[in-house]
Image: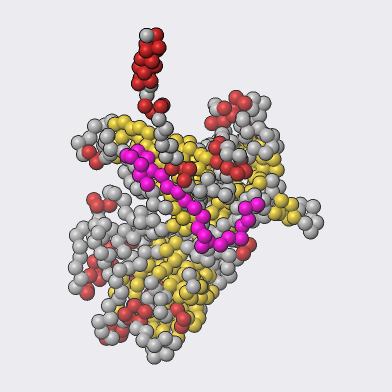
């Protein structure tokens, strides 16, 4: 009986044990990262909440989002200077990102609604499991994202359209959406990409760009270091005038002294009332140049080039002018030095963190977008001893900037067209360089510009109204009401088709400076799609054909020595009644007809693109009409008058 009771108890215990313990089970599927032998990326939406105000338009209702972007190196090679694209698609506004910065140089917070590329900071390189024995703290980085998105209400999640590795030489599979809140993708080296970089090299090779900036640390101490910043222009049409350079300090650094450049605002207030003043109690902050988190640096004038305190730096002190390399190699570079003080916990000689989010701009120059600093091999400099040897920097970073053309960018110069066969000048387009929001009260921002007599090009826009109305009455042109707005451009260029004969043709180009800024060492360029191979000579400018993108269709021009200065607008002889006078330069350019089928009046005699100091100018939408050759006889007096007036003003 006792045995039977024991058997019954054993049976009861056996039946109460969970089945999963008494029977073998299938192994759980491995995480998605385990099946990726390259760079594994994942984006996880963590949580969100509705934000005020409460809007009736649901698509514009703001919501908070918190997400995590993870980058894991499961490959065989170290991933240097990682960059990841996240295809945000809900008009996201990013408030913070831990462990990353925006690769395009923009600061956070900022709009990222059209997608953005993140770059690693301060951990920009991800090592492999092999060289770290699987240490995830060196193999992986997790970026915590916080921001605002619009229109995606719970239970839906605001996921991006895509994530991918933005480093060159990698191919990514199609992203996989796991559930409603996670997306992942695996990226592997592209076998088709050949590189001469070996895995043993510690740093990436320098990259090419329209403009590059080197941040070279030349001397380092526990609490400070000296850095040299070198700006180099590599684009044949790139240029900067009165450049302004800015960046973000990431660790509360501040600038103590500089040579070759200066902050646009000298101010130590933020240090005195901040952490810096508390830590450096014995430092005289009266001598500190800048404590701003985002300083703006400007070049010094040439008069300071040999100043023992501020100058004596090679390639410094040119009023911020950087020319193309083919114009003058010595003026294609600008450089300065600065002493930077650090803050705890970075107080040792080897702890150097370069500033991030670099931006550079000029006056009437192209728009540049700069990437984040990338660690490269230390730069070499001629040794200060004068011996034939080089000394290397302690550490070097490269920032690559490229000229960008964004739809919202407004031109800074414009072009007018005229010809020997038409008496009317086609002026610059209405609002070619933008119009203020209040312009609709006084003028029409959408009405086409009125045709003008040739002499009207010599006076400012505000003095042309009577001439334009009189010309319209004489030629029976309509007069809009209200009148068209101005082009609002600081520089305008007139291209005049001068002659057209059997074996050749010629044009006259006139540059007008309507602003107050003088342009030293100016240049212009015109792109002629079909007629450029026939370029013969330019008589008052230096000119040559320039190869761009494999084509010799661009003609580059600059002033002769002594005539390379385009002055700003000045008062007339009698300021009380005479209009202001623009700065002007003019030359005739001749061509041969070595290409069959050229039709000057149909467009071959007019440029398809015009540049001034690297900035692409706005072109008219129409060409001068060739209605009748009889217009020529009536137009010759106007042409002669324009030439005589120009010569008279030049005297």
Look at 63% across and 36% down and name the residue there: 341
Look at 34% across and 55% down and name the residue there: 434
Foreground residue among 127 and 250: 127
Magenta stretch holds residue 180 = yes
Q: How is the image coloured?
A: secondary structure
The total number of labels drawn is 0
Q: Is residue 197 visible?
A: yes
Q: Quadrant of the N terminus?
A: top left
Look at 26% across and 31% down and name the residue there: 53
Q: Residue furthest top?
A: 2
Question: x, y (%) of residue 227?
Answer: 65, 45
Q: Residue furthest front?
A: 1
Residue interval drawn in magenta: 176-200
Question: x, y (%) of residue 430?
Answer: 30, 61
Foreground residue among 108 and 472: 108
Q: Quadrant of residue 627?
A: bottom left
Magenta stretch holds residue 5 = no
Question: x, y (%) of residue 615?
Answer: 44, 61
Look at 29% across and 36% down and name the residue there: 62
Q: Quadrant of residue 60?
A: top left
Depicted 482 relative to depicted 283: above or below: below
Foreground residue among 327 and 38: 38
In the displayed structure image, the side of residue 126 where residue 366 appears, left or right: left
Question: x, y (%) of residue 587?
Answer: 47, 75
Q: Residue furthest bottom?
A: 502
């Amino acid at each position: 009986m006792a045995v039977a009771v024991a058997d019954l108890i054993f049976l009861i215990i056996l039946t109460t044990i969970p089945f999963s313990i008494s029977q073998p089970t299938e192994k759980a599927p491995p995480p998605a990262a385990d099946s990726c032998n390259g760079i594994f990326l994942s984006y996880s939406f963590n949580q969100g909440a509705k934000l005020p105000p409460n809007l009736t338009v649901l698509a514009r209702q703001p919501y908070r989002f918190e997400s995590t972007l993870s980058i894991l190196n499961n490959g065989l090679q170290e991933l240097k200077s990682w960059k990841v694209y996240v295809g945000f698609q809900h008009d996201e506004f990013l408030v913070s990102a831990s462990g990353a910065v925006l690769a395009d140089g923009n600061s956070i917070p900022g709009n990222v609604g059209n997608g953005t590329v993140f770059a690693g900071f301060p951990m920009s390189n991800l090592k492999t499991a092999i060289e770290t024995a699987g240490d995830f703290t060196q193999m992986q980085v997790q970026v915590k994202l916080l921001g605002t998105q619009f229109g995606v209400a719970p239970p839906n999640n605001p996921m991006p359209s895509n994530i991918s590795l933005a480093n060159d030489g990698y191919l990514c599979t199609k992203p996989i959406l796991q559930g409603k809140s996670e997306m992942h993708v695996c990226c592997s080296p592209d076998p088709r990409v050949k590189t001469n970089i070996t895995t043993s090299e510690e740093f990436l090779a320098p990259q090419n760009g329209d403009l590059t900036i080197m941040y070279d640390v030349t001397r380092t101490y526990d609490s400070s270091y000296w850095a040299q910043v070198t700006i180099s222009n590599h684009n044949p049409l790139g240029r900067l005038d009165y450049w302004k350079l800015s960046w973000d300090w990431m660790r509360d650094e501040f600038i103590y002294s500089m040579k070759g450049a200066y902050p646009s605002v000298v101010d130590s207030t933020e240090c005195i009332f901040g952490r810096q003043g508390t830590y450096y109690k014995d430092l005289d902050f009266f001598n500190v140049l800048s404590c701003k988190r985002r300083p703006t640096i400007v070049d010094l004038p040439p008069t300071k080039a040999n100043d023992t305190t501020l100058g004596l730096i090679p390639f410094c002190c040119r009023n911020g002018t950087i020319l193309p390399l083919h114009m003058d190699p010595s003026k294609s570079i600008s450089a300065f030095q600065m002493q930077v003080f650090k803050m705890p916990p970075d107080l040792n000689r080897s702890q150097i963190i370069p500033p991030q989010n670099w931006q550079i701009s000029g006056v009437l120059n192209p728009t540049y977008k700069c990437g984040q600093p990338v660690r490269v091999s230390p730069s070499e400099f001629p040794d200060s001893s004068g011996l034939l040897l080089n000394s290397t920097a302690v550490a070097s970073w490269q920032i690559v900037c490229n000229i960008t053309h964004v739809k919202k960018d407004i031109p800074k110069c414009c072009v007018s067209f005229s010809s020997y066969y038409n008496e009317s000048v086609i002026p610059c387009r209405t609002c070619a360089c933008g119009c203020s929001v209040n312009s609709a009260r006084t003028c029409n921002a959408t009405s086409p510009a009125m045709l003008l007599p040739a002499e009207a090009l010599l006076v400012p826009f505000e003095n042309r109204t009577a001439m334009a109305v009189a010309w319209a009455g004489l030629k029976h042109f309509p007069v809009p009401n209200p009148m068209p707005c101005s082009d609002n451009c600081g520089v305008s260029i007139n291209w005049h088709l001068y002659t057209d004969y059997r074996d050749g043709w010629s044009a006259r180009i006139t540059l007008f400076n309507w602003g107050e800024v003088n342009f030293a060492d100016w240049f212009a360029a015109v792109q002629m799609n079909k007629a450029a191979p026939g370029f013969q000579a330019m008589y008052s400018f230096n000119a040559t054909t320039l190869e761009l993108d494999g084509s010799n269709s661009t003609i580059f021009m600059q002033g002769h020595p002594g005539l390379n200065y385009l002055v700003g607008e000045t008062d007339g002889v009698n300021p009380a009644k005479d209009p202001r006078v623009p700065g002007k330069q003019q030359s005739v350019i001749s061509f041969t007809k070595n290409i069959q089928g050229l039709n000057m009046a149909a467009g071959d005699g007019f440029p398809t693109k015009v540049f001034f100091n690297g900035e692409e100018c706005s072109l008219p939408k129409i060409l001068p009409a060739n209605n009748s050759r009889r217009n020529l006889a009536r137009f010759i007096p106007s042409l002669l008058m324009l030439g005589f007036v120009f010569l008279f003003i030049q005297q």
